[in-house]
Image: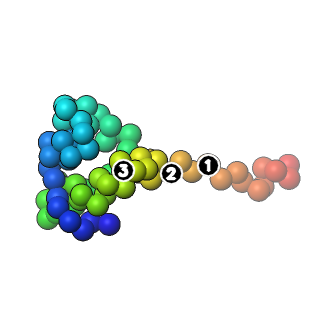
């Protein structure tokens, strides 16, 4: 990941086909596409390509709470 062109949020929204960058920004609250660049304010074209192909790849993983084995034996 991280090869090719880099886009700011407006360019990334346009590249992904969104007319409004603010709508794309709302999507980014749910889908965590990694930021790149020295200021961590750019999106890699390769990451955007993956996002458009499979958005679920950028959903955060929800972990189940560990159940204490001590509680199971009481």
Kindly identify which residue carries mark 3: 51
Whether residue 9 can be seen here: no
Q: Position of residue 62 (x, y in %)?
A: 53, 48
| For residue 3, side relative to residue 62 (left or right) | left
Per the image, label 1 sits on a secondary structure element best described as loop
User: Which marked residue is nearer to the observer: mark 2 or mark 1?
Assistant: 2
Q: Position of residue 23 (x, y in %)?
A: 25, 31
Q: Identify the residue at image location x=24%, y=36%.
A: 18
Q: CA distance from mark 2 to mark 3?
A: 16 Å
Q: Are marks 2 and 1 in contact (CB under 8 Å)?
A: no
Which comes before the other along the chain, label 2 or label 3? 3
Q: Identify the residue at image location x=16%, y=53%.
A: 7
Which comes before the other along the chain, label 1 or label 3? 3
Q: CA distance from mark 2 to mark 1?
A: 10 Å
Q: CA distance from mark 1 to mark 3?
A: 25 Å
Q: Position of residue 8 (x, y in %)?
A: 14, 49
Q: Position of residue 4 (x, y in %)?
A: 20, 65
Looking at this view, name the residue that lies furthest to the right: 73
Q: Identify the residue at image location x=85%, y=49%.
A: 74
Kindly identify which residue carries mark 2: 61
Per the image, label 2 sits on a secondary structure element best described as loop
Which image quarter is the N terminus in?
bottom left
Could you say which is closer to the camera, residue 21 or residue 70?
21
Crowd band around label 1 with a 10 angstrom C-alpha radius: few (<14), some (14–19), many (20+) = few
Q: Which mark is residue 64?
A: 1
Q: Which mark is residue 35?
A: none
Q: Quadrant of residue 21?
A: top left
Q: Identify the residue at image location x=22%, y=55%.
A: 43
């Amino acid at each position: 990941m991280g090869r090719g062109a880099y886009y700011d949020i407006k360019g990334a929204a346009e590249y992904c086909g969104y007319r409004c960058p603010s709508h794309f920004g709302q999507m980014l609250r749910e889908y965590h596409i990694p930021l790149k660049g020295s200021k961590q304010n750019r999106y890699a074209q390769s990451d955007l390509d993956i996002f458009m192909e499979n958005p679920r790849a950028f959903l955060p993983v929800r972990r189940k709470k560990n159940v204490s084995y001590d509680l199971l034996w009481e």
